[in-house]
Amino acid sequence: MPGKTNPSLKDPELYEELRKDGASKEKAARISNAAAKEGRATIGSRGGHSGDYDEWTVKALRDRAKELGLRNYSSKRKSELISMLRNH
């Protein structure tokens, strides 16, 4: 929801950038809040890269959906799984 701010987000600008890049709501909030607390350079030097969901197999996407506790993912197509993962 662009334009609507969440008071629990410490760096809403970074949050929006991460969401546009395909990060889930949970991941974007976690990274933006950590960056606001510790500095963007510190957070940026920390993590790895999991790759774009478009490059994942359907099985890997389903495994990730299961890991996150999502429901009704087993019959979804790849594009639907990606959407579910990005918007959970």
Image: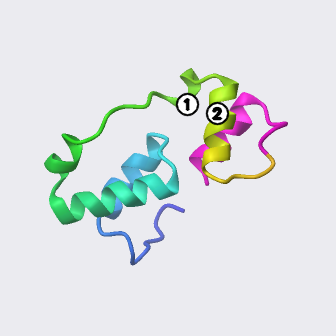
**Picture residue at 15% right of the left edge, 57% below the top:** 39
How many numbered badges does the structure rendering display?
2
15 to the left or right of 65: left
Q: State yes or no: residue 77 in magenta.
A: yes
Give the mark toward the camera: 2 or 1.
Answer: 2
Q: Earlier in the sequence, mark 2 or mark 1?
A: 1
Q: Which residue is mark 2?
A: 61
The span shown in magenta is 73-88
- Residue 80 drawn above or below residue 17: above
Residues at marks 2 and 1 touching, judged by CB atoms closer than 8 Å: yes
The answer to which quarter of the image holds residue 77 is top right
**Picture residue at 48% right of the left edge, 70% below the top:** 4
Q: Which residue is mark 1?
A: 53
User: x, y percentage for residue 45?
Assistant: 18, 40
The residue furthest right is 75
79 to the left or right of 41: right
Mark 2, secondary structure of its residue: helix
The answer to which quarter of the image holds residue 12 is bottom left
**Picture residue at 69% right of the left edge, 36% below the top:** 62
